[in-house]
Image (cartoon, grey):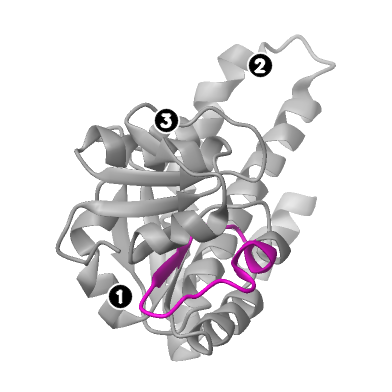
């Protein structure tokens, strides 16, 4: 087994999101052992294995990127995780992450959960804006900080294993809410003689101008005072309704 001082790791799961970081690590000179549940071409420079057990045995750092929590447990069940640092990049809930941390800890491993804030094409690309939330074992995070920074930026959000998933879900909720509202705006103009291509810059500019109001909302939530900084009062709303 490789130790933490060597540039080596294992990646379990070679879907689009698992392949992207595996490729970036191989390109950065890491010895990357990979395994996938079904037939899949391994990234150039990586070493495929026929079983998950063989892949896990190869390195102390094991990155998992599978469809869901159940597939992670099924893959790791029965394997010797003693001395392994399991970094889970599988999308899941905070509760699943916390339970998985206990499950892995009981089997001798340390656990980091990750929330990927990027699409696969952004991974491993300089200045793409991609980053990954991590939470869980501070010791595991410190031991592998250099490796974790290769595919994307890193933001460690604490020892609670569920926090990375929570940050991920919360920000995705904000993103999809924005997309849904944009779709609604396009629907409103669809039957009129208004080009959506012409309308889009106006919408984006307005969204950017309004986004800063989130800071005011955050301050109100933190302080409990909802009377400060109010511009759109009920009186303004009533005027808009007339």
Which secondary structure lies at badge 2? helix
The label nearer to you, 3 versus 2, is 3
Task: Let me know if residue 107 appears in the view.
Answer: yes
Q: Nearer the viewer, residue 133 or 223?
A: 133
**Secondary structure under the numbered disc 3 in the rendered image:** loop
Q: Furthest residue to the left? A: 5
Residue displayed at 72% across by 27% down: 186
Does any portion of residue 229 appear in the rendered image?
Answer: no
Q: Position of residue 199 (x, y in %)?
A: 60, 20
The earlier-in-sequence mark between 2 and 1 is: 1
According to the picture, the residue beneath numbered tag 2 turns out to be 196
Disc 3 from disc 1: Cα separation: 25 Å
Label 3 environment density (alpha carbons within 10 Å; few <14, some 14–19, many ≥20)? many
Is 178 part of what is drawn in magenta? no
Residues shaded magenta: 72-91
Q: Residues within 10 Å of mark 1 (few under 14, many from 20)?
A: many
Closest to the observer, 238 or 70? 70
Instruction: Give the CA separation, mark 2 to mark 1.
Output: 48 Å
Instruction: Read off the residue under disc 3.
Output: 43
Instruction: Name the residue at 72% across, 33% down.
Output: 183
Residue 10: where, in percent of width, then height?
Answer: 39, 53
The correct choice, above or below, for 198 with respect to 16 in the image is above
Above-or-below relation of 15 to 53: above
233 or 77: which is nearer to us? 77
Q: Position of residue 134 (x, y in %)?
A: 39, 67
Q: Is residue 232 left or right of residue 83?
A: right
Task: Out of 84 and 217, give the one closest to the viewer.
Answer: 84
> Which secondary structure, mark 1?
helix
Q: Residue at x 69, y 65 (%)?
A: 74
| Residue ID for mark 1 | 140
């Amino acid at each position: 087994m490789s130790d933490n001082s060597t540039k080596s790791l294992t990646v379990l799961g070679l879907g689009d999101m698992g392949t992207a970081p595996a490729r970036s690590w191989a390109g950065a000179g890491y010895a990357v052992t990979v395994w996938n549940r079904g037939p899949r071409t391994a990234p150039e420079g990586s070493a495929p294995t026929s079983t998950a057990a063989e892949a896990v045995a190869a390195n102390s750092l094991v990155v998992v990127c599978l469809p869901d929590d159940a597939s992670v447990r099924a893959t790791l069940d029965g394997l010797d995780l003693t001395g392994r640092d399991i970094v889970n990049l599988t999308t899941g809930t905070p509760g699943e992450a916390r339970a998985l941390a206990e499950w892995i800890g009981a089997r001798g491993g340390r656990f980091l959960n990750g929330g990927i804030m990027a699409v696969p094409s952004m991974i491993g690309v300089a200045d793409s804006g991609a980053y990954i939330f991590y939470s869980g074992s501070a010791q595991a995070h410190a031991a592998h900080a250099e490796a974790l920074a290769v595919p994307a930026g890193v933001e460690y959000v604490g020892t609670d294993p569920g926090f990375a998933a929570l940050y991920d879900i919360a920000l995705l909720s904000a993103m999809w809410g924005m997309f849904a509202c944009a779709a609604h705006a396009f629907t409103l103009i669809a039957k009129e003689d208004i080009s959506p291509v012409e309308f889009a810059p106006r919408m984006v500019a307005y969204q950017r101008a309004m986004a800063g109001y989130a800071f005011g909302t955050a301050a109100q939530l933190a302080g409990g005072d909802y009377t400060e900084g109010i511009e759109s009062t009920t009186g303004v709303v009533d005027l808009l309704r007339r």
